[in-house]
Amino acid sequence: MPLSTTPYEERLTAPRSWWLISFLVGLAMALVLLPFGTLPLLGGLVGGTAVAAVMASSYGSLRIRVVGDSLIAGEARIPVTALGATEVLDAEEARAWRTYKADTRAFLLLRSYIPTALKVEVIDPEDPTPYLYLSTRDPQRLAQALEAARKAVA
């Protein structure tokens, strides 16, 4: 499978503030265990912080990639031949498509902490999904990569 001429890969990492919140969860756990002594307090701090950090990291581990003739978004793998027009969504339009404009049949890979998105039409007649909504920090570059992959396949 040949690589697209404009390769694209993005990891939808959690924002920095979530790491501070992870520490605060550990601190809260330490305070809960304070009456039991110093060792449980330290265990609560380390364990609570670690568990919260692992959860933040796993939530931010999704990737969007354009590889060869496919778009890989999270667990979904879609051939670019099944994709149609793309629409770059600014913060306001992205919010609208996440809420009142959303279609329940659409594939939504959304992260509320990423304000911009790309809406990609699905043209495969066998697929009931009308479009893909992909939260991305660089929707213009993703649209260009999809277009380049479509041209490479054609």
Image: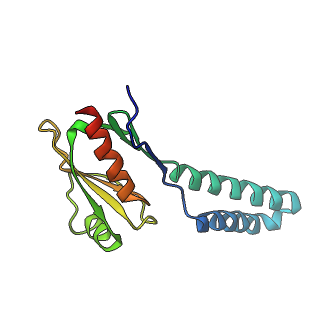
Q: Nearer the viewer, residue 32 or 146?
A: 146
Rendered location of residue 48, percent (x, y): 69, 58
Whether residue 110 appears in this view of the structure is no
Farthest residue toward the bottom?
92
**For this view, does 29 lie left or right of residue 58?**
right
**For this view, does 137 lie left or right of residue 91?**
right
Identify the residue at horizontal 69%, vertical 64% (top origin). 23
Whether residue 121 appears in this view of the structure is yes
Q: The C terminus is located in which quarter?
A: top left
Farthest residue toward the right?
38
Q: Nearer the viewer, residue 104 or 39?
A: 104
Q: The N terminus is located in which quarter?
A: top left
Rendered location of residue 55, percent (x, y): 58, 53
Identify the residue at horizontal 63%, vertical 57% (top origin). 52
Count of numbered labels shown in the rendering: 0
Identify the residue at horizontal 55%, vertical 64% (top origin). 15
Q: Quadrant of residue 151?
A: top left
Farthest residue toward the left?
125
Classify 4 as above or below 110: above
Identify the residue at horizontal 60%, vertical 65% (top origin). 16
Rendered location of residue 137, percent (x, y): 44, 60
Q: Quadrant of residue 110?
A: bottom left
Rendered location of residue 7, percent (x, y): 43, 42
Classify 75 as above or below 45: above
Instruction: Specify the color scheme.
Output: rainbow
